[in-house]
Image: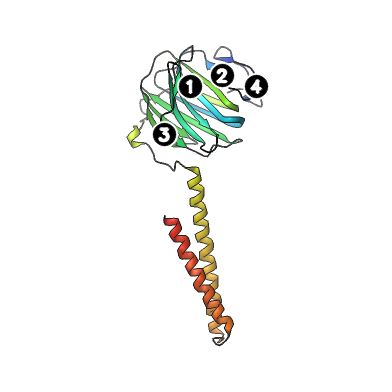
């Protein structure tokens, strides 16, 4: 927990950090080295879970969890979430010789939002990384290599963040990780998810309108108003609503 400083466990680097309300806050967005670094090396195979809130930011709005980190920062592996539009995401990436690489197969688009609180969990066994967001397995990725005796650190990049709690422990032999070929295939485009929901809503609305129009036409027939021009209007309206329903269903299936 982050109720107060714990210098025997964590080294606080940079400024604009503040302990308040039971959390550690990075209060100003920065691209400089501002991080909370674990003093002792982490186990080779480990599991990390953290609850945190994206509280703000400027451009990239990223919250980053590094491991295997060298003292000079030129070697590291990391998992981060970003609220950067137009593609908020969770990403597994790495740095070699000071150069960062963002492999497409390590990325999954997720609707990360400012003000959102998230529960990140990732497990590392040798080169294999599995990552969960809010208890949903979203990424399986194999790193190109690992180095021993590195550090774990938490930071924000162009972001403000509140870290509520964190747990780091050796990975249980009983926890089975999945390989990248078995990686889940969630919808990688939040925009598409919204469009799909909107299409389903249009279908529901069209079904209601079609039923109502057909009911009105049937009632008019029952009342014997077949010679009334209003009956033909109702029949035409029912046919139109039925056609709109068919179009909505067709658009949903595209």
Residue 113 on image: x %, y %: 57, 37
Q: Assign the C terminus to one quadrant of the image.
A: bottom left
As displayed, is residue 201 above or below residue 63?
below
What residue is pinned by disc 3?
139
Lower position in the chain sequence, tag 3 or tag 2: 2
User: Which label sits on residue 19?
Assistant: 4
Lower position in the chain sequence, tag 1 or tag 4: 4
Residue 6 on image: x %, y %: 59, 15
Left or right: residue 152 compared with residue 12: left
Q: Spatial distance from mark 3 to mark 4, Cα to Cα? A: 32 Å
Q: Which residue is drawn at 48% across and 61% down?
A: 248
Callout 4 touching callout 2 (CB < 8 Å): no
Mark 1 or 4, which is nearer the eye? Answer: 1
Circle 4 crowding by C-alpha within 10 Å: few under 14, some 14–19, many from 20 = some
Q: Spatial distance from mark 3 to mark 2, Cα to Cα? A: 24 Å
Lower position in the chain sequence, tag 4 or tag 2: 4
Circle 3 crowding by C-alpha within 10 Å: few under 14, some 14–19, many from 20 = many
What residue is pinned by disc 1?
66
Lower position in the chain sequence, tag 3 or tag 1: 1
Residue 21 on image: x %, y %: 66, 27
Callout 1 touching callout 2 (CB < 8 Å): yes
Lower position in the chain sequence, tag 3 or tag 4: 4
Comparing 149 with 63, the one in front is 63
Comparing 51 with 145, the one in front is 145
What residue is pinned by disc 2?
35
Q: Which colour scheme is used?
A: rainbow
Callout 1 touching callout 4 (CB < 8 Å): no
């Amino acid at each position: 927990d982050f109720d107060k400083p714990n210098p025997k466990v964590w080294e606080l680097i940079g400024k604009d950090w503040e302990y308040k309300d039971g959390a550690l806050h990075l209060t100003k967005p920065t691209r400089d080295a501002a991080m909370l670094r674990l003093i002792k090396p982490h186990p080779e195979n480990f599991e990390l879970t953290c609850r945190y809130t994206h509280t703000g930011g400027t451009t990239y709005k990223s919250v980053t969890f590094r491991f295997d980190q060298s003292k000079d920062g030129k070697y590291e592996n990391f998992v981060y979430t970003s609220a950067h539009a137009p593609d908020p995401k969770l990403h597994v990436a790495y740095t070699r010789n000071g150069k960062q690489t963002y492999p497409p197969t390590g990325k999954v688009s997720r609707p990360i939002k400012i003000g959102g609180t998230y529960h990140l969990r990732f497990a590392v066994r040798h080169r294999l990384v599995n990552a969960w967001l809010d208890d949903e397995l979203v990424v399986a990725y194999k790193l190109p290599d690992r180095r021993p005796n590195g550090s774990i650190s938490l930071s924000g990049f162009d972001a403000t963040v509140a870290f509520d709690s964190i747990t780091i422990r050796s990975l249980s032999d009983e926890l089975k990780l999945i390989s990248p070929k078995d990686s889940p295939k969630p919808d990688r485009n939040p925009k598409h998810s919204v469009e799909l929901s909107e299409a389903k809503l249009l279908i529901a609305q069209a079904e209601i309108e079609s039923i109502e129009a057909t009911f009105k036409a049937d009632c008019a027939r029952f009342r014997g108003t077949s010679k009334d021009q209003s009956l033909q209007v109702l029949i035409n309206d029912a046919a139109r609503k039925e056609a709109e329903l068919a179009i909505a269903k067709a658009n949903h299936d595209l």
